[in-house]
Image (spheres, grey):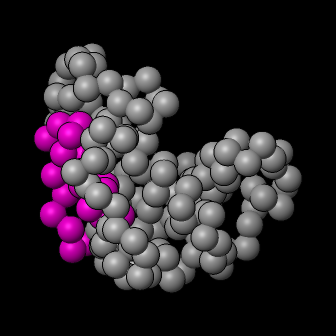
């Protein structure tokens, strides 16, 4: 898949999540936004998607799942359409010691990364002690802490 195609898919997913929350249908202009997008809603929805993926992360992931999750997070260093946000995210990812040995660690890691971003832009910090209660089983993705299903290595 070409880089531009992956970027389009990412933007579409984030905007689709936003439109679902706002009961709004997407237009072609929504799907192909300005590459220099500086939209607060886009950034908020981006973090929501990362929190949701962390909440659905396996309780006991195999090495392939761990590597895939790291690759997923690293891919956004190149795919985010807003240049300023992309650089901020890249610096956070490159300087953060990601812990992803289980779902709770993944949820906490994304929360802490989100807080690093919030510090940069002077936003209120998230109470990460509540992150697992909020995202760990209440993400709407069907994941619960008791999920044991995992593809064998």
Find residue 70 and report its horizontal and vertical position in percent: 28, 52
Res 59 → quadrant = top left
Residue 132's place in the image compared with 36, above or below, is above
Find residue 140 and report its horizontal and vertical position in percent: 49, 30
Res 88 → quadrant = bottom left
Image side of residue 141 versus residue 113, left or right:
right
On the question of residue 65 being in view, the answer is no
Tell me the residue at 43%/75% (across/down): 123
Find residue 7 and report its horizontal and vertical position in percent: 59, 59
Image side of residue 50 versus residue 44, left or right:
left
Magenta-tinted stretch:
94-114
Q: Main secondary structure of the magenta part?
A: helix
Image side of residue 51 versus residue 4, left or right:
left
Give the total number of marks visible in the rendering.
Answer: 0
On the question of residue 41 being in view, the answer is yes
Between residues 151 and 114, which one lies in front from this camera angle? 114
Tell me the residue at 75%/56% (across/down): 31
Find residue 64 and report its horizontal and vertical position in percent: 23, 36
Asked if residue 135 is among those painted magenta in the image, a careful observer would answer no
Image side of residue 9 versus residue 71, left or right:
right
Q: Quadrant of the C terminus?
A: top left
Tell me the residue at 46%/68% (across/down): 78
Asked if residue 96 is among those painted magenta in the image, a careful observer would answer yes
């Amino acid at each position: 898949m070409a880089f531009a195609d992956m970027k389009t898919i990412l933007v579409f997913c984030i905007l689709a999540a936003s439109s679902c929350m706002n009961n709004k249908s997407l237009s072609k202009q929504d799907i192909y936004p300005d590459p220099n997008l500086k939209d607060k809603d886009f950034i908020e929805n981006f973090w929501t998607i990362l929190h949701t993926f962390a909440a659905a992360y396996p309780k006991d992931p195999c090495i392939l799942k761990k590597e895939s999750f790291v690759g997923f997070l690293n891919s956004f260093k190149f795919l985010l359409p807003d240049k300023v946000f992309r650089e901020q995210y890249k610096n956070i990812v490159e300087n953060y010691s990601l812990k992803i040995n289980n779902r709770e660690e993944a949820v906490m890691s994304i929360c802490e990364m989100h807080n690093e971003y919030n510090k940069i832009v002077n936003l209120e910090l998230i109470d990460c002690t509540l992150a697992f209660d909020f995202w760990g089983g209440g993400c709407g993705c069907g994941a619960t802490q008791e999920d044991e299903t995992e593809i064998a290595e």
